[in-house]
């Protein structure tokens, strides 16, 4: 068989083919050398049973199991693994469980491609340590079952960060003590049990869940339930569709600061990740300019303008999160040298960053909208463009070690059904995943497309939701038309919100 046709992401150090072959029977035996990784043994058995659809028997480890898990003594990279197929069985080894789990995905793809494996040795490690998917569940609620399916797909293709955009103008999706009206059954939300389940489900699959509550802008859903947290007192109606809205949190009011802290408390209690994302993008400051409370706060602090007040608020909340052991991530829109250097910035609009050179002080996660916005049509963000993105981030990372990695983003203003979300995700999620994992010298779009077209079983239960090859890379004319339409829409939104682009 030709391994090059079946592995995705392709291994960073390639595949060394060896003599001989190994044949699987209908049942797979699984062993752990010296009882290593005991806390994961049962999960791994169940996981393989589900993913491979075959019976998995735990063996004592001394009788040449089909797959032997080994803990290496020498230190490998955090997710690095070695997978060796020998005539007597397969051996998967790593220093860490993370390495075992990522290597397991390679093993699964090998077994799924053929039950007779040519002997080989694969040494593999990721190019980027932060390989994320941002999922917006605020604009359109994503039911739990669908969300778990997305996590499964992320695991299969070795993505390791789920950036969970869990509130926005159009919806608030998790409970906060003392603020019961933020959520309602009708609108859809995740209970504490749901969130615990998602976090644990993802963690077992080597995926860290980083929650995002965007503040002080993108808050209409919260303000509609608690208008007193705004500058004007409302009333507010939860909007639908896209837009930038002028009403934001009033940072002049003590009640609002208490609310923001309570939100951080809640995120800290629900999410074990050392990171929380506090948004900080698209914040029209007009309300603060005419609000007596905000103006009073500004004078008290000795600031000359509302932008400085925004910097104060962001630094205050980040400091509060830091006391609780969390690093804060903010969208890069307003972050400059006055922001605490421990804040990590996420770049969505590279044109803003070009002039500010903000990332000289801060660590950076890259997700620019020309390459990583999967909610856009394939005419705007073709498959080939997503594939190129990881390569450029890898280059940035070589020049600047403050670049942590990259994310793909799925905003859902217009993706209000599972079918639409999946057709936008797949197969672009796979293109991003390979380009984030596989080292640039081994990336090949030609090989990637061949795998997609011929060999790989795509990830959705409903293959009809996966886009067809004919639209993955549309003609230039279609791309030009789509870009014009998009520019028109963005300009109209910004005008309405009083933001100049
Ligand atoms: Zn105010």
Image: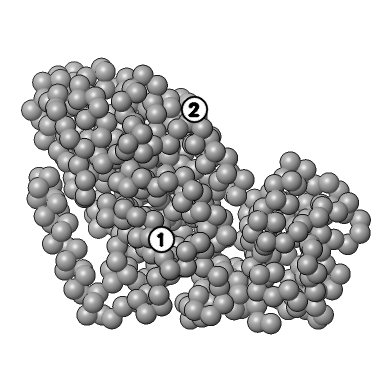
Viewer-nearest residue: 172 or 86: 172
336 relative to 23 in the view: left or right = left
Image quadrant where residue 390 sits: bottom left
Label 2 sits on a secondary structure element that is: helix
Residue 280 rendering spot, x and y as whole percentages: 29, 40
Q: Residue at x 21, y 70 (%)?
A: 482
Q: How far across and down, in percent of the image, does residue 52 sit? A: 67, 62
Identify the residue at horizontal 61%, vertical 78% (top origin). Answer: 4
Name the residue carrying label 2.
Answer: 269
Disc 1 versus disc 2: nearer the observer: 1
The image shows residue 265, relative to residue 423, as above or below, that is above
Q: Position of residue 470 (x, y in %)?
A: 37, 80
Q: Position of residue 188 (x, y in %)?
A: 36, 39
Q: Is residue 164 left or right of residue 179?
A: right
Which quarter of the rendering shows the N terminus? bottom right
* Farthest residue, direction front: 186
User: Is 485 located above or below residue 131 in the figure?
Assistant: below
- Whichever of callouts 1 and 2 sits on the residue coming sooner in the sequence is 2
Q: Nearer the viewer, residue 220 or 318?
A: 220
Q: Residue furthest right?
A: 62
* Residue beneath the point at 76% across and 59% down: 55
Which residue is the site of mark 1? 422
- Find residue 48 and report its image quarter: bottom right
Q: Is residue 177 above or below residue 165?
A: above
Q: CA distance from mark 1 to mark 2?
A: 31 Å
**Which image quadrant is residue 89 in?**
bottom right
Residue 260 appears left or right of 447: left
Residue 173 in view here: no
């Amino acid at each position: 068989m030709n391994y090059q046709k079946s592995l995705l992401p392709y291994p960073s150090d390639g595949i060394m083919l060896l003599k001989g072959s190994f044949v699987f029977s209908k049942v797979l035996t699984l062993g752990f050398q010296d009882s290593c990784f005991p806390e994961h043994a049962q999960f791994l058995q169940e996981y393989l049973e589900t993913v491979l659809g075959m019976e998995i028997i735990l063996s004592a480890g001394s009788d040449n199991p089909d797959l032997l898990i080994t803990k290496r003594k020498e230190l490998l990279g955090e997710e690095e693994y070695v997978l060796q197929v020998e005539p007597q069985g397969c051996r998967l080894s790593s220093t860490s469980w993370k390495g075992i789990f990522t290597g397991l995905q390679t093993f699964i793809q090998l077994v799924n491609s053929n039950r007779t494996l040519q002997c080989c040795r694969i040494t593999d490690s990721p190019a980027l340590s932060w390989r994320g998917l941002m999922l917006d569940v605020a604009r359109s609620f994503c039911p739990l079952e669908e969300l778990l399916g997305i996590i499964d797909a992320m695991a299969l293709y070795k993505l390791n960060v789920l950036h969970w955009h869990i509130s926005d103008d159009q919806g608030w999706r998790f409970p906060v003590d003392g603020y019961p009206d933020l959520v309602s059954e009708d609108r859809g939300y995740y209970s504490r049990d749901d969130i615990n389940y998602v976090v644990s489900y993802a963690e077992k699959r080597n995926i860290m869940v980083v929650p995002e509550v965007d503040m002080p802008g993108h808050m209409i859903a919260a303000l509609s339930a608690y208008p007193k947290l705004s500058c004007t007192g409302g009333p507010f109606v939860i909007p639908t569709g896209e837009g930038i809205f002028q009403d934001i949190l009033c940072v002049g009011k003590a009640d609002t600061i208490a609310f923001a802290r309570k939100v951080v408390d809640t995120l800290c209690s629900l999410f074990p990740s050392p990171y929380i994302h506090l948004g900080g993008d698209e914040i029209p400051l007009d309300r603060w300019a005419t609000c007596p409370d905000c103006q009073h706060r500004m004078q008290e602090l000795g600031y000359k303008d509302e932008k400085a007040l925004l910097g104060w608020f962001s630094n205050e909340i980040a400091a509060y999160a830091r006391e609780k052991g969390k690093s804060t991530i903010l969208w890069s829109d307003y972050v400059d040298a006055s922001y605490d250097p421990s804040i990590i910035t996420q770049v969505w609009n590279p044109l803003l960053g070009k002039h500010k050179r903000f990332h000289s002080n801060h660590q950076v996660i890259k997700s620019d909208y020309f390459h990583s916005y999967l909610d856009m049509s394939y005419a705007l963000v073709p498959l080939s463009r997503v594939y190129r993105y990881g390569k450029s981030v890898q280059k940035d990372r070589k020049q600047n070690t403050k670049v942590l990695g990259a994310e793909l983003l799925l905003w859902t203003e217009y993706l209000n059904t599972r079918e639409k979300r999946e057709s936008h995700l797949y197969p672009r999620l796979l293109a991003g995943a390979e380009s984030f994992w596989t080292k640039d010298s081994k990336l090949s779009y030609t090989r990637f497309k061949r795998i997609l077209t011929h060999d790989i079983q795509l990830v959705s239960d409903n293959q009809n939701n996966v886009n067809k090859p004919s639209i993955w890379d549309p003609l230039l004319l279609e791309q030009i038309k789509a870009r014009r339409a998009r520019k028109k829409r963005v300009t109209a939104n910004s005008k309405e919100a009083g933001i100049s682009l």
